[in-house]
Structure formats: C-alpha cells, structure tokens
Amino acid sequence: MSILVFILVFGIVVFSHELGHFLLARRGGIKVNEFTIGMGPVIWKKQGKVTVYSLRLFPIGGACMFEGEDGKVSEPVSDEISSSTAGGNFQDASVWVRISTVIAGPLFNILLAFILSLILVGFSGTDLPIVTDVMDGFPAQEAGMQAGDRILAIDGQSIHLYREVSLASFANKGEEITIKYERNDQEYETVIKPEYDEQSGRYYIGFMGAGELQRCNPLQTIQYSVYEVRYWLISTVKSLSMLVTGRVSTSEMAGPVGIAQVIDTAIDETTPYGFGTVMLTVINIAILLSVNLGVLNLMPLPALDGGRLVFMLIELVRGKPVPADKEGLVHLIGFVALMLLMIFVLYNDIVRIFT
C-alpha cells in the first residue's frame, strides 16, 4: 500500500511539473517531442499526433523534451501535420516564450499545492497562531505573554498559522525577535531573546501547544489555503538556507527512498484513525513535496530549471544567446553533479532505514 501511495503521490507531483512545461511550450509554438513520467526503461508508450507520451519504470522524475532543445531537429511526425500545428524549434522561440515555458513547471507545482491545500483545509481546518500555554521560566513568560494571546507578526512578518511561529523559533539562532500579539482586542509588542536549550541543541521562545484548530467556511478555506502554501514556501527556503549554512546536516536530506519511508510511517501511524485521516496526511505530504520540487527547480543551478533561466536572463542582457555548446557543457557538468548528489542522498536514505 505504501509503495502504491508513493508512486501515486510522486507521479502526481511530477506530472503537474511537466504539464506546466508542456502547456506553455505548446501555447508558445514549441514542438514537444516527448512527454514522459518516470526515469529508466520505457514500460508504456503512445504516439500522439505530435508528441510521444510515455511511462518509465522508476517513478522518481519526468521530462518534457522540446524540439531542438539539444541542438538536434527530429524528422517530421507526419506529412499531414504542418509545422505550424506541430510547433517549432525551442531555440527559435523568443526568449520570453522560453522563459515562460521553463518557469511554468515550478509554478504548476505551486498551483498543485494550492489545489491540494483547498482539500486539506476544507476538511481538517487550520491551526490559528494562538498561544496554548507558556513554559515556566522561559523568555515568553518573562515578557508577560499568556495563554490565549494571538500572534500577529514576528519581526514584521505577518503570522497566520501557528506553524509559522514554530518555524520562526526553530530557525532562530539566538537573535532578539519582535513579537506583535493581540489580547482582548488590544495589540501589544514585545522583544524576546530566545533561550538556548542544551538538551535539544536549539533556541526556544517558550510557547507550548500547537495553536488552536479552526474549521473554515468556503471563503476562509481559500484564504487559509493561500497561507498554507505560503508557509511551505517559507519553510522550504529556510530549510535550504539552514542546509547551506550547516545548521542542518546533509544526512537529514531525503530522496525518493526516504520519502517512501516517510509515507509508510505516516500511513502506519494514521491508519487507526480511519481512511480520511490517512488521506489528509498523504495530501499534506504531497503539498510538501510539490512545493519542494517547485522551489528546488528554481534554484540557479545547472541542469535545473533555474539554471536554464540564468542563461536566458544572460541572453536578455547580452542581446544574444550563450553559445549552445558552452551552455550544454555547463548543464552536463551540473547533471553529473546532480546524479552524484542523488547517489549520496540514496545512501543516506538506506543507512537511515537500517539505523
């Protein structure tokens, strides 16, 4: 069951990403030679009027292959299909069409996350940023904060979910933070310096609990679905920042095997609470994965969508494209590095299973 759920979740997330590339390419007049989900050997293939649609054995990726993207031009699909209908060469399209095509994949991941959030928030509600209790002797209590206070902003950034409060606490490195909160319809502001806890190795503000659950009407469902996606975007960016700065160990990175293990654990732990709880938990994981895939692909690294965008932005500045052979070499090096990273993450995942 866990394997099937993993394939379904990963497939939907990857499909949405590649669908974004596909739709914007076709709209921009670019021919799509192949639309594939998965990696490795082909297990199913169908020739459309223009595009080959395929499924591959390993459900851990996908691709949308454009005409002329690699410098090669394929043979016409059929004499009955005109070039204007099939689409043209990727490199011949305007730079803005190519930018929109490349960026559409990550944006469709964000759109998928929003759609899934509508389901999640609509059925389970949301966690309001209301303090359940404060810890004795910790900075929040010393600053006069009490149970029932509603957090409005932290360091000038508006707060809508209790998880945003937890994220701000987790990411804190001991710096003072300014908290704006509401009590009895009155707004207050205080400055708190989190306290370091040796046992857990992190700083704490001193709040307890997980916020106050609120069921949402249709308008609130839309509103808090936006906040849900916003939270995961901020969480992903902050997590990457902590990874780069060494505050999070590379051993804590997870690839497909690690994700499958997370799904398996989540299903085991939520099964006693019924099918609905299992589904909402899986949807929550899918939101996390979709946002992660979108953000990671926008990073300005070779072989990723963000890396391709960098070359297009250079083209806008120079007024002409970077030579295809030089760009191809950079992406090749990036792809090799990406494969090495995948091997490292796979090793971590397997070690984590046995330890």
Image: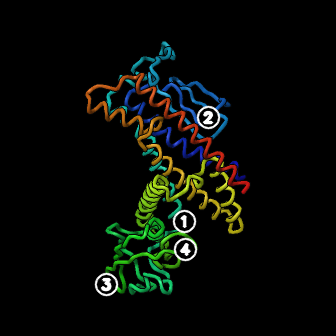
- Cβ–Cβ below 8 Å for labels 1 and 2? no
For label 3, the SS is strand
Residue shown at the point (48%, 67%) measured from the top left: 170
For label 4, the SS is loop
Tell me the amino acid under the disc marked 1. Answer: Phe
Of the two numbered discs 4 and 3 on the same chain, state the one appearing first in sequence: 3
Of the two numbered discs 1 and 4 on the same chain, state the one appearing first in sequence: 1
User: Could you tell whether 88 is left or right of 355 in the image?
Assistant: left
Of the two numbered discs 4 and 2 on the same chain, state the one appearing first in sequence: 2
Residue shown at the point (72%, 52%) measured from the top left: 1
Disc 2 to disc 3, C-alpha distance = 56 Å
**Label 1 environment density (alpha carbons within 10 Å; few <14, some 14–19, many ≥20):** some
Residue matched to label 3: 186
Q: Is residue 24 above or below residue 81?
A: below
Disc 4 to disc 3, C-alpha distance = 36 Å
**Label 4 environment density (alpha carbons within 10 Å; few <14, some 14–19, many ≥20):** few
Of the two numbered discs 3 and 1 on the same chain, state the one appearing first in sequence: 1
Residue matched to label 1: 123
For label 1, the SS is helix
Disc 3 to disc 1, C-alpha distance = 32 Å
Q: Is residue 200 above or below residue 332?
A: below
- Cβ–Cβ below 8 Å for labels 3 and 1? no
User: Could you tell whether 155 is left or right of 138 in the image?
Assistant: left
User: Could you tell whether 324 is left or right of 170 in the image?
Assistant: left
Res. 328 in view: yes
Of the two numbered discs 2 and 3 on the same chain, state the one appearing first in sequence: 2
**Residue 154, picture quadrant:** bottom left
Res. 114 in view: no
Residue shown at the point (34%, 78%) measured from the top left: 191
Residue matched to label 4: 198
Tell me the amino acid under the disc marked 4. Answer: Glu
Tag in front: 4 or 3:
4
